[in-house]
Amino acid sequence: MRDIKSMTPEELGDALRALGQPPFRARQVFAWLHRGAASFEEMSDLPKDLRGELGRSFALSRPTVARKQVSREDGTVKYLWRLADGNCVETVLMGYRHGNTVCVSSQVGCLMGCAFCASTLGGKVRDLTAGEILDQVIFTQLDSGRPISNIVMMGIGEPLDNFDNVLRFLELVNRPEGLNIGMRHISLSTCGLVKKIDKLAEYGLQLTLSVSLHAPDDETRNALMPVNRSVGVDKLLETCRRYFEKTGRRISFEYAMIDGVNDSDAQADLLARRLAGTGSHVNLIPLNHVEESPLKPSRRVRAFQRRLEERGINVTVRRRLGGDIDASCGQLRRKAREEMEGQGGKGQ
Ligand code: SAH
């Protein structure tokens, strides 16, 4: 059965026309879905027959809260959602002065194998549908009662490895008939899949593209991020320049600071040289410690920041939110799985 929440208003219109319905029904159904209706029965302004017909023709599911943690430090909320097939993904809700931001996952697990990241430890299980990515926004908003104004695609998974569903999600969440979140309020983070960055540029979206760089030299980046081995930093930065020329949107580079690995003065200097004149922005992320990993947080974040600034680079240091609840993604899903496997004997 077709997943109705992944459909655009136009696709819904076609499907409803085939059922003999007038055009305004599609807008009604779309609005119900995006407000989080859990069943067709709830859609009280639709004729009863139509509700029955929709129930027989389309799949409609909603995620349930498997775990929820609220930070006592700053009100950050972390959800572990259980999807219709039993898989779980994480979503984090963060409050900033300019509004509430939700960090969504795009896949169950991740293929990319970055050395510092908890999300990739068990590999990739599957892509999320557009509707499942959207559900994280809809149900986080409903459950928390906090209106969401910004979205970052920085949760579990590599969004550009699930390109079509992610693009469809962006279209859906942007629609005025639905959540109406503007592209300039959305950031998408990628480990640097160059062909997909070029493909994304074709759409000219006004979102913010963040590229996880984490090292300015191939030796270090190859060791941290397997994706670099076939591309290299040069080609990645060239692709980023092309993206900027095509979309007019400056790329933001993420750089997780790892003790003794990517935090030397020489690496700061090389990074500054490579980004010179691009107007790019660097976001330094204090490393979140992952139990399974020997990598440790750097103690040189401020020194590294100053050195980049002295060389003309715009730098911010990511504020750490939800430190008391493992707010970095991937960790809650792993913990919950381990606990469930512990209770139920062997898991996979
Ligand atoms: N696949 C996308 C989204 C991943 S998560 C990407 O690679 O960009 C968003 C950011 O968190 C990425 O920059 C990622 O490299 C970073 N990250 C992953 N694990 C981390 C950790 N343990 N500490 C700090 N940042 C981490």
Image (cartoon, rainbow, N blue to C red):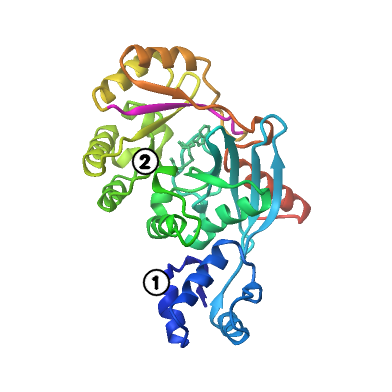
Residue 237 shown left or right of residue 175 in the figure:
left
Helix, strand or loop at label 1? It is: helix
Residue type of the residue flagged with mark 2:
Leu
Q: Type of residue at label 1?
A: Glu
- Visible residue check, residue 118: yes
How far from the left and from the top, in percent, is residue 92?
A: 59, 43
Task: Please provide the residue range marked out in magenta.
Answer: 279-290
Q: Is residue 169 left or right of residue 291?
A: left
Report the mark closest to the observer, 1 or 2: 1
Q: Secondary structure at mark 2?
A: strand
Question: Is 179 rendered above or below residue 328?
Answer: below
Q: Nearer the viewer, residue 214 or 150?
A: 150
Q: Residue at x 56, y 74 (%)?
A: 59
Q: Which mark is residue 10?
A: 1
Give the camera-side residue of 297 and 46.
Answer: 46
Percent x, y for residue 193? Answer: 33, 45
